[in-house]
Amino acid sequence: MKIPLFFAAGAVVAALAPAGCDPIAEPRLCGEIPQGGCPIGRGGSCDDAVCQALYDCIDGTWTAAVRCDRAGEAGQDAGAGGGPGGDCEVVALDRAGEASGCEPALQEPDCPADAAETCAATACWTGCLDFFLCTGDGWRAVAYCDDAGRITVTP
């Protein structure tokens, strides 16, 4: 008696499938993004006039990653966004000598200074390790993330 080939192959696949599959963890969704916020991981950009801040979905909670300040607009309160209860110590950088048009462009994990000027507790959640300011002399390091994930501003 011959067993059809498609039946034999199907039986082998069905027998092996459960052995090689690991359970997939359910994603923790963040829900609706805060008012004026844009998702940093889905193409959000401070170039978009609608975005007042960029947020990252971390463990089911929207967390402020980058504040989008624009010339001529009032800045956000230091207590806005960030951690539980809105507590946020904003990273303040010395922007003396700032210029534009530095070449070559920064590459990950290097980021522009703007990416650091968010809540100190979450600044290193952006994936950036070093933060640079464009000056007339080129890129100048202004902050970095240490091994513990804390941001340190360089003098």
Image (tube, rainbow, N blue to C red):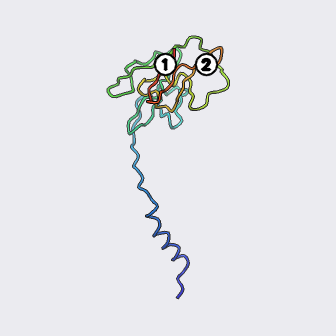
Farthest residue toward the front? 147
Q: Mark 2 or mark 1: which comes first in sequence?
A: 2
Q: Position of residue 65 (x, y in %)?
A: 46, 29
Q: Quadrant of residue 89?
A: top left
x and y percentages locating residue 119 in the rendered image: 42, 24
Residue under pointer 2: 134
Q: Position of residue 56 (x, y in %)?
A: 45, 34
Q: What residue type is disc 1 on? A: Val
Which amino acid type corresponds to the residue marked 2 in the rendered image? Answer: Cys
Between tags 2 and 1, which lies in front?
1
Left or right of residue 140, residue 127 in this image: left
Kindly give the residue lying farthest to the bottom in the view shown.
1
* Residue lying at 61% horizontally and 31% vertically, measured from the top left: 107
Q: Residue 153, labelled with which disc?
A: 1
Q: Position of residue 58 (x, y in %)?
A: 41, 37
Tell me: 99 left or right of 20: right
SS type, badge 1:
strand
Pointers 2 and 1 in contact (C-beta within 8 Å): no
Q: CA distance from mark 2 to mark 1?
A: 16 Å
Residue drawn at x 42%, y 53% is 24
